[in-house]
Image (cartoon, rainbow, N blue to C red):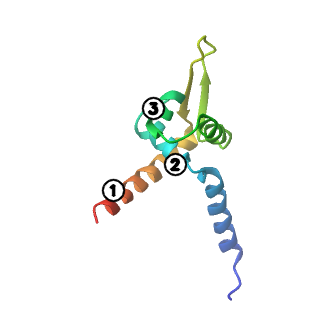
Amino acid sequence: MAKRTGDEIERCKSVSTLQRMIGGKWKIEILFYIALKNVSHFGQLRRCIGNISESTLSKQLRELVEDGFLARIDYGEVPPRVEYRLTARGESFVPILLAMKQWGEQELNL
């Protein structure tokens, strides 16, 4: 087996980091709805995704906020009103989402 160079190891680390950040079962779909379908509220996301529990959606959203893909805007109102929006990092991921969407569409048309 060939020994990896420092550059190869760094590239693997970057892929591992990306996998950790967006690797949750629902994260890509959450980003898709927020970025490409203008869905910004928890309830809307839950309805769009369908088969996701409230606790799982909360956890995945929290992780996306922690990793800098989303911003959580709490309006401090009663009843509570919270919105999720893409950050600069999230916006930079939109071309990747579009490429994934295009690839998926091509695969469905086989």
Q: Quadrant of the C terminus?
A: bottom left
Horizontally, is 11 left or right of 107 in the view?
right
- Kindly report the distance in space between the C-alpha atoms of the residues bearing marks 3 and 2: 14 Å
Q: Which mark is residue 85?
A: none
In the image, farthest residue toward the top = 78
Dot label at residue 28: 2
| Among numbered discs 1 and 3, the one appearing first in the sequence | 3
State the residue position of label 3.
39
Give the secondary structure at mark 3: loop
Please give left or right for residue 15 compared with residue 109 in the image: right
Label 2: element kind: helix
Which amino acid does the dot numbered 2 rest on?
Ile
Q: Residues within 10 Å of mark 2 (few under 14, many from 20)?
A: some
**Residue position marked by numbered label 1 in the rendering:** 105
Q: Residue at x 69, y 80 (%)?
A: 4
The residue closer to the viewer here, 110 or 15, is: 110
Q: Position of residue 78 (x, y in %)?
A: 61, 10
The 10 Å Cα crowd at callout 1, few under 14, some 14 to 19, many 20 or more, is: few
Q: Amino acid at mark 1?
A: Glu
